[in-house]
Every structure is written in C-alpha cells, then in structure tokens.
Amino acid sequence: TMRLSEACCVGELLDTLPSEAISPVLNVGSSTGHFRKNEQPHIDLHIFEPLCKRNVVVIHVDLKQADGVDYAGDVLDEGFQHKLRSLHPKLIMCSNLLEHLTDPFSFLQACAEILEPGGYLLITGPRSYPYHLDPIDTMYRPGPTEIQRIFPDYESVFGKVISSTTYLQDLSRRYSTWKIASKFLSDTLKMPLRFVFNFDKSKASYHRYLWLFRPYTSTVVLLRKPKK
C-alpha cells in the first residue's frame, strides 16, 4: 500500500531528475495495472502518468504475470537478473515491498547488480505503519539511515520520512461518526473470538487502531550508484 503523501513525494522527486538520466525505469514489485490505476489511482496519477508524459520508459516487474506486468519472475533468480540487466535500467523503484520479503537484503543487492552504473535506486516503504499481510509482514520498518547503510558506496540524493494521515482520518473520509463508533464497538466485542481462529489476520485488522490518532509515516530514499 502506498500512501498518497508518499506517491506525491516520489512524483516530485522524479520530476527533479532529467528524463534521459532515469529512462528506462524498472518498477520492481509493481503489482497489477488495475492496482496502480484503480485500487490506488494516486500511484499512477502522481508517478507513472507524469513519467509517461516525459516519454520515460517504465517497465513493470512482478513475481507473477498479470495485466500491467511487463516482466514476471523472481529477482533473486540469476537468469531473471540477466534478463533485467539486459534492459539497462537507469532507475530501479522498489516501493512497499521489503517488509513482505524474508530476505530484503539479498533482494536489494540483486537490484543493485541489475542497475546500470551511475543509475538511481529509489526505495520506499512503511516507517510507522501497522502489521499488514501480503502474504507476510516481517515488520521491517527501516528509516532512511538504515537503508543508506546498506549501500555505503552509493551517493545519498534524498532521504526523508514522510508523514500521512491517521487511521481515524481515513475512517472519517468513508464513514459517519456513528458508523465509526459502531465499527469500533463491534470490533472490540469480536476481538477475542477472532484472535482464537485466525491470529495473523486478526492482528492485521486490530493493529491499525494503534494509529487511530497518530499518523502513518513512510520512508523515501533515493540513492545513486557509483559510475564505476
């Protein structure tokens, strides 16, 4: 899940980079076209539409083949790495993916191997955010400094924690005050039984209440690979 504030930050950041310096872009862990355009339309609106208008080539990469996925495969597979490397990507995007991987460090190193010398690595993800399954959540919540330390020889172009809305604000946009109160009461009454039958799914549902009054935050980091 990419927050609106995160998408705006990424879009503004990409606008500062010349088109020829970032094309082609590999969007690794892209999900489907329907997800980017319909489920979370702010992703397409603020990131990919502006890139398209600038004639920047964007290649969507995901583990499974689906509508809107240009290349399907496992980035940790050497054969697939070779295929992606042959595209000569000048920017690799990895958004809201690391917390769903059992070995995020190997994944990032693979991305670094695929990236062209002098290219950019754009990494985003949750910093303060509830437990969410897709299909797992390791609760990896790195800040900019933690990401930058993984690539000590890379130039740090941008690193910031972006603040977003609270869970209550999100609910208020969808429901009346009465419906929010009713939902909270219903969730409270059903909590013990739900945890007994499906702990992980229930944790994902109830953990977000810890953000009822505090904002979600996201990490956005842009690094540049050495030219040699």
Image (cartoon, grey):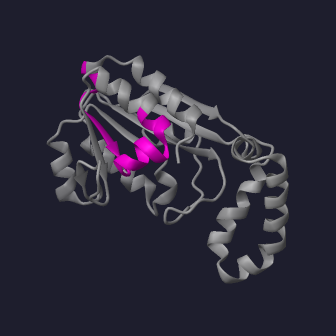
In this picture, residue 42 sits left or right of residue 5: left
Question: Quick one: 127 or 196, which is closer to the camera?
Answer: 196
Instruction: Quadrant for residue 188, please give it.
Output: bottom right
Q: Determine if the magenta segment contains residue 92.
A: no
- Picture residue at 80% right of the left edge, 54% below the top: 179
Please provide percent x and percent y for residue 101. 45, 60
Instruction: Quadrant for residue 4, please give it.
Output: top right
- Up/down of 112 relative to 225, above or below: below
Instruction: Quadrant for residue 106, please give it.
Output: bottom left
Q: Determine if the magenta segment contains residue 41.
A: yes
In the rendered image, is residue 95 in sight? no
Please provide percent x and percent y for residue 226. 31, 29
Question: Quick one: 22 or 6, which is closer to the camera?
Answer: 6
Please provide percent x and percent y for residue 66. 29, 56
- Up/down of 100 relative to 201, above or below: above
- Picture residue at 83% right of the left edge, 59% below the top: 182
Question: Quick one: 92 or 165, which is closer to the camera?
Answer: 165
In the rendered image, is residue 47 in sight? yes
- Up/down of 186 relative to 161, above or below: below
Image quarter where the C terminus lies is: top left
* Residue that sits furthest to the bottom in the current view: 197
- Picture residue at 45% right of the left edge, 29% below the top: 46
Please provide percent x and percent y for residue 59. 26, 40
In this picture, residue 71 sits left or right of residue 132: left
Q: Which residues are magenta?
A: 20-44
- Picture residue at 24% right of the left edge, 20% below the top: 20
- Up/down of 8 relative to 124, above or below: above
